[in-house]
Image: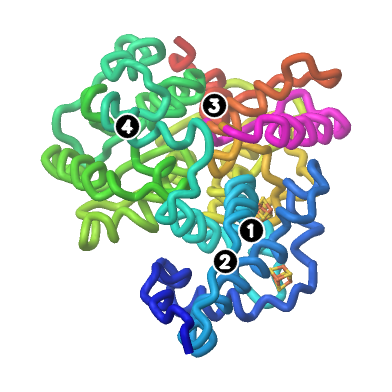
Amino acid sequence: MSKDRTTHKKRSFIEELTKQQVLEIDACTQCGECLRHCPVQEVSGNLSISPPEKIRMFREFIRATEGLKNWLFGRDVDQKLLEDFTRAVFECTTCGSCSQNCPVGIYTQRLWPVLRKEMVKRGLGPLGQQAEMPAVIEKTGNPYNKPPDQRFSPWFPEGVAISEQADIAYYAGCTGSYEAYPMVRGDVLVLSSIGSPFTTLPPEEEVCCGFPLFITGQHDLLEKLVKRLVNAYQERGVKTLLCSCPCCVNIMVRDWPVFYGKKLPFSIRHITQFVSDALKKGALVITSELNQRVIYHDPCYLSRGVGIMEEPRTILNSIPGITLLEFDRHGLDSRCCGAGGAARKVFQENAMAMGRLTIDEAVSKKADKLILSCPACYEKVNDAMKGHDNQIQIVDIMELLADLIEGCNQ
Ligand code: SF4
Ligand code: SF4
């Protein structure tokens, strides 16, 4: 037999997967239930990027290259198939809607990033501008290639006191700081109104949380970023780290302990958790009425990612006069606004179309305001409204709150 038996020593397709994920890939019945909930399917109609097709392809890669058949026959996977798969897995917004609706319980919101990482290791991903992110983050501390010393200056409210040491720290994040000023400004104004002392890192030291690298499968810098941030907060005596970006919260809760190498020395909370507690305790009082209909969009990484759905609604329902509307798909079933998974950097048309579906539904329900709680949603849905027939006022939840609290609306 003259077959080359060395192929089994090549990189394995299951190298990055947990045993659970290998089982999940095997367990997909191709039932197609997830298809009805995939926002990329909804706007593109391209079945080759559907969840079952991606799983089927990856399962074929594993079958072709693992086990006895591979040892005997040393099959390789066609390069074109690998490239098609890579494009498909990077076109996904990683919104997790397919997970939520999978009868077998395949946890795709965690699976897709791992499959992306595998394709990065094979030199096939990431795509387009995504590939520049590690070098840009290394140089500037943010994925937008913006000056680190201007991270806070355009939006940080004047007169808000920042403690050197405090139990509470606020992490603004890169997208909020550079792309969604009203959101992070609102966060700081509301925190200041609550009155508990809080600290922040100096702008040059508040580097990226690592999520854009994690989600695009580029993990090399992650340990360094995480250790740098965790140690800096620890030096300031922080017990609770607050953050308003769902993607930051997600990686902090789920992955920072892994990259840090042990349990974090502080807890992580989304700002809506902290603020809804403050409202319940009377530490924050909403002084103005808002006689309007508002609709709240659940960010994928806040609802499906870390299960925070009640607190934003508690905050909104605390506003006197408000009528809170719901999207047909909300909470765990929320439809991605198109901003997720760094896909918006490459697949602009999909992102725009998804953002417009969110706007159209909000307008059709006669909402006066569309309330968001994620800087990526804020950036992308605002983008999607440019030149669109339907228009609505887009407001971040803390931006809204800051406007309704006396002494807060500087
Ligand atoms: S994570 Fe979202 S965008 Fe990606 S395949 Fe699943 S439903 Fe579609
Ligand atoms: S719902 Fe689950 S089992 Fe069905 S095709 Fe989608 S991923 Fe596979």
Label 3, residues with CA under 10 Å away: few <14, some 14-19, many ≥20: many
Determine which of the numbered discs, if any, sits on residue 135 in the image: 4
Q: CA distance from mark 2 to mark 4?
A: 31 Å
Of the two numbered discs 2 and 3 on the same chain, state the one appearing first in sequence. 2
Query: Compared with residue 287, is residue 279 higher up or lower down, i.e. above or below?
Result: below
Label 1, residues with CA under 10 Å away: few <14, some 14-19, many ≥20: few
Quadrant of the rendered image containing residue 134? top left
Position of 162 with respect to 332 (left or right) is left
Of the pair 230 and 395, the residue shown nearer to us = 230
Quadrant of the rendered image containing residue 235? top left
Mark 2 lies on a secondary structure that is loop
Of the two numbered discs 2 and 4 on the same chain, state the one appearing first in sequence. 2
Q: Which residue is mark 2?
A: 77
Whether the residues at callouts 2 and 3 have beta carbons within 8 Å, the answer is no
Whether the residues at callouts 4 and 3 have beta carbons within 8 Å, the answer is no
Position of 139 with respect to 250 (left or right) is left
Determine which of the numbered discs, if any, sits on residue 81 in the image: 1
Mark 3 lies on a secondary structure that is helix
Q: Comparing marks 1 and 4, which lies closer to the viewer?
A: 1
- Which residue appears at 48% of the width and 17% of the height? 406
